[in-house]
């Protein structure tokens, strides 16, 4: 049994079952035993590989996107480039290298990384040592200093905790993590959640008995949006997910590039759930932001010129390198790989007008 499971069982024994949200938050972020707190999980030898780890093209194109946003903002003398959950720091390193093409943009940049894992923050420091720009680390998006900002979040929102509710004849009940016999198991709180009905999105209000609804607190997105509201800027959110709020659940464990039971070995496996892009869009629209219809990752990267970028890299490559570039291009953009499951959403201050990549 993992040390975190011992702790979770102790809490359940005293307090009763845990919400899935509390369970997920502890599994990923427990200060001693949390998954991200104790390891660098990326790459072929780790548990999963993200887009920036597949190819430098991903971060470079996002760097070019950020530069285009800065121009669209009227080239402010100072702008924060903020990344939420930067992993190994690869996306930011590639983005800052690409930004060398626009020295005025680089000169305006202050780089801010929001990261809760000390292990990964140390890795980011190493990756970005040669970037030649001031970088500040924060644990919380609320600590980002005032001023115009461009936010980037790749595979960040899927790691934020989710809730589940189950529909019964009486109403909606929170789904929880309980002890059944000698193992952790899902259970349903017998008392219906009060007032839950009121906050439900219309699309799922008429759910049949037994249906599960999964959602993520809007709190994190709202903090980011609040920053855009009081200063200029835009946010780019890339993740796997869906574009219409719906019933069903996607809570999953990932280990060694394969799916794993989310209730087995807490703290040792990655836990994620797909992102409801419609929910993020609603939060942005309610705050008066412009929110663009999400694009698939494949479409977004093609609009930013990934095919031309790949061709340019291949023109200077050995045959082996050229084959690697082609395979990375396919992984990032092909519909049966990351191209369609992953979506890209932009939320921007209305003063921005057009959003690069979305309005071209
Ligand atoms: N963006 C990176 C890493 C994605 S993994 C990439 O594409 O490779 C998720 C990242 O978010 C990790 O760096 C993890 O430590 C961080 N993280 C998870 N929850 C967080 C939170 N609540 N606040 C800040 N960072 C968090």
Image (tube, helix red, strand yellow):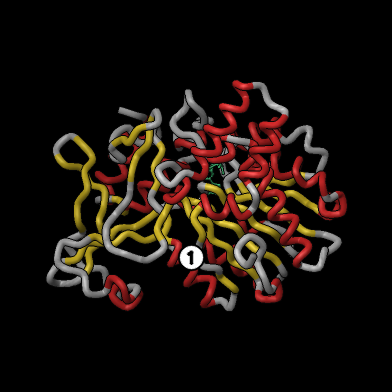
Residue 4 appears in the picture as rendered = yes
Provide residue 282's location: percent of width, then percent of height.
47, 72
Circle 1 residue: 280
What's the residue at 52%, 32% (across, down)?
A: 327
**Where's the C terminus, which quadrant?**
bottom right
Q: Is residue 108 above or below residue 352?
A: above
Q: Is residue 220 left or right of residue 47?
A: right
Provide residue 312's location: percent of width, then percent of height.
70, 37
Residue 138 appears in the picture as rendered = no
Q: Is residue 151 left or right of residue 159?
A: right
What's the residue at 68%, 26% (across, down)?
A: 317
**Where's the N terminus, which quadrant?**
top left
Label 1 residue near ligand 1, CB within 8 Å: no
Badge 1 element: helix
Q: Is residue 338 left or right of residue 126?
A: left
Provide residue 335's location: percent of width, then percent of height.
43, 47
Nearer to the camera, 2 or 121:
121
Numbered label tally: 1
What's the residue at 19%, 66% (across, down)?
A: 167
Ligand 1 position by quadrant: top right
Nearer to the camera, 235 or 165:
235
What's the residue at 12%, 71% (across, down)?
A: 169
Q: Is residue 300 above or below residue 6?
A: below
């Amino acid at each position: 049994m993992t040390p975190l499971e011992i702790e979770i069982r102790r809490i359940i024994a005293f307090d009763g079952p845990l919400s899935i949200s509390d369970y997920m938050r502890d599994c990923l972020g427990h200060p001693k035993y949390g998954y991200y707190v104790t390891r660098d999980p990326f790459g072929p030898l780790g548990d999963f590989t993200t887009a920036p780890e597949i190819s430098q093209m991903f971060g470079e194109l996002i760097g070019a996107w950020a530069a285009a946003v800065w121009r669209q903002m009227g080239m402010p003398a100072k702008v924060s480039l903020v990344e939420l959950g930067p992993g190994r720091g690869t996306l930011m390193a590639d983005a800052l290298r690409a930004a060398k093409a626009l020295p005025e943009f680089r000169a305006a940049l202050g780089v801010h990384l929001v990261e809760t894992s000390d292990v990964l923050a140390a890795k980011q420091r190493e990756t970005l040592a040669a970037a030649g720009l001031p970088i500040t680390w924060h644990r919380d998006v609320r600590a980002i200093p005032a001023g115009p900002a461009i936010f980037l979040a790749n595979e960040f929102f899927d790691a934020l905790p989710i809730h589940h509710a189950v529909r019964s004849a009486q109403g909606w009940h929170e789904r929880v993590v309980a002890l059944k016999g000698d193992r952790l198991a899902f259970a349903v709180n017998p008392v219906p959640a009060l007032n839950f009905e009121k906050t439900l999105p219309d699309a799922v209000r008429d759910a049949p008995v037994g249906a599960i609804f999964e959602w993520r607190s809007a709190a994190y997105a709202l903090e980011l949006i609040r920053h855009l509201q009081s200063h200029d800027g835009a946010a780019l959110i890339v993740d796997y997910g869906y574009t219409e709020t719906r019933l069903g659940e996607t809570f999953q464990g990932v280990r060694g590039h394969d799916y794993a039971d989310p209730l087995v070995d807490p703290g040792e496996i990655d836990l994620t759930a797909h992102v409801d892009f419609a929910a993020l869009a609603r939060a942005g629209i309610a705050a008066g932001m412009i929110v663009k219809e999400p694009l698939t990752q494949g479409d977004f990267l093609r609009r930013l010129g990934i095919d031309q970028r790949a061709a340019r890299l291949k023109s200077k490559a050995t045959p082996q390198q050229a084959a690697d570039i082609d395979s990375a291009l396919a992984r990032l953009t092909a519909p049966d790989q990351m191209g369609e499951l992953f979506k890209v959403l932009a939320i921007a201050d209305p003063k921005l007008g057009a959003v690069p990549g979305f309005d071209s």
